[in-house]
Image (cartoon, helix red, strand yellow):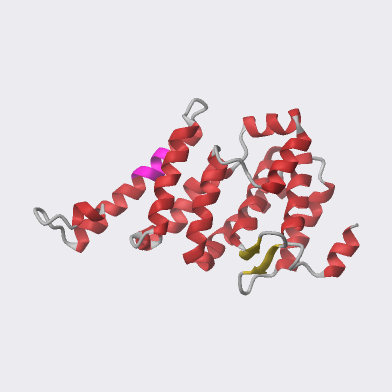
Amino acid sequence: IKNWGNSEDDKKTPEEIQNVQQLWLALYSDLLTLMNMSATASTQLVISDFEALTAIARSNDKEFLIAQGNLENFCLNTLIPCVSLNDDDIEEFYNNSLEYFLRDIAGLESESKRYSAQSFLKILGRYYKQDLANVFNMACQSLLATYNANPDQSWKEMDTAMFIMGIVIAKIVHHNRGVIEIIDEFNLTQFLQSFIIPQLGSKYPLLQVDALKFIVDFRAVIEPEIILNLF
């Protein structure tokens, strides 16, 4: 987009470039949404799309990703569905729960839609951490309400909420110690009480794994007495 807009033979105005950027993001968002809805969509194509978005997030052109409500629309309508569990994820967990858990603790495999979306989210979070937190905090409250209304039908929404917030609220992550600093003005204790701790006793093993992973990742910033009371 940048090269096209700055071509000496056909230089575009800032308004024309902005319009093309908006169209480009809308097309990518629609494409990811359609592929996520399709059971036969190519995983590699989804990965490639997120790699392109991640490259933009690293570039000087990243500002348009948050302009005109783009960040909220993309996160709510595209990114959340892409990181939600699918049937293959659930089947893999029940076929080999220990391997799934160990891989989840160590980090997601690279060749997956969820990992690609996570990578994009992490890069975007370097520059717009508070913006992401504001968007996802409200979204996760909605997911929690949906889950509480009907846990049996909506338990995957709880998994999505914990997965996303575990990325968004982490400000500094140490290789051995996990998260050592979280974003400003985030009430971690309240989040633990509302989202995480109740899932340790969930009848859904995947939610138990999610909750345990969150506690392991954030152990350095969780009040010691909370952890002592859990075990």
Residue ranking furthest to the front: 176
Residue range highlighted in magenta: 27-31
Q: Which image quadrant is residue 32 in? A: top left
Q: In this view of the protein, can residue 16 be seen by the observer?
A: yes
User: What percent of the width, then of the height, locates residue 25?
Assistant: 35, 49
Q: Is residue 35 above or below residue 193?
A: above
- Locate the C terminus by quadrant: bottom right
Q: In this view of the protein, can residue 81 be seen by the observer?
A: no
Q: Which image quadrant is residue 12 in? A: bottom left
Q: Is residue 130 above or below residue 16?
A: below
Image-based side of 138 in relation to 31, left or right: right
The rendered magenta stretch, by its main secondary structure, is classed as: helix
Residue ranking furthest to the top: 40
Q: Is residue 29 magenta?
A: yes
> Between residues 103 and 221, which one lies in front from this camera angle?
103
Image-based side of 71 in relation to 112, left or right: left
Image-based side of 116 in relation to 22, left or right: right
Q: Is residue 146 magenta?
A: no
Q: Residue at x 64, y 63 (%)?
A: 173
Q: Residue at x 77, y 35 (%)?
A: 97
User: What percent of the width, then of the height, locates residue 84?
Assistant: 59, 42
> Between residues 142 and 58, which one lies in front from this camera angle?
58
Q: Is residue 172 above or below residue 25?
A: below
> Between residues 110 and 85, which one lies in front from this camera angle?
110
Q: Residue at x 49, y 25 (%)?
A: 40
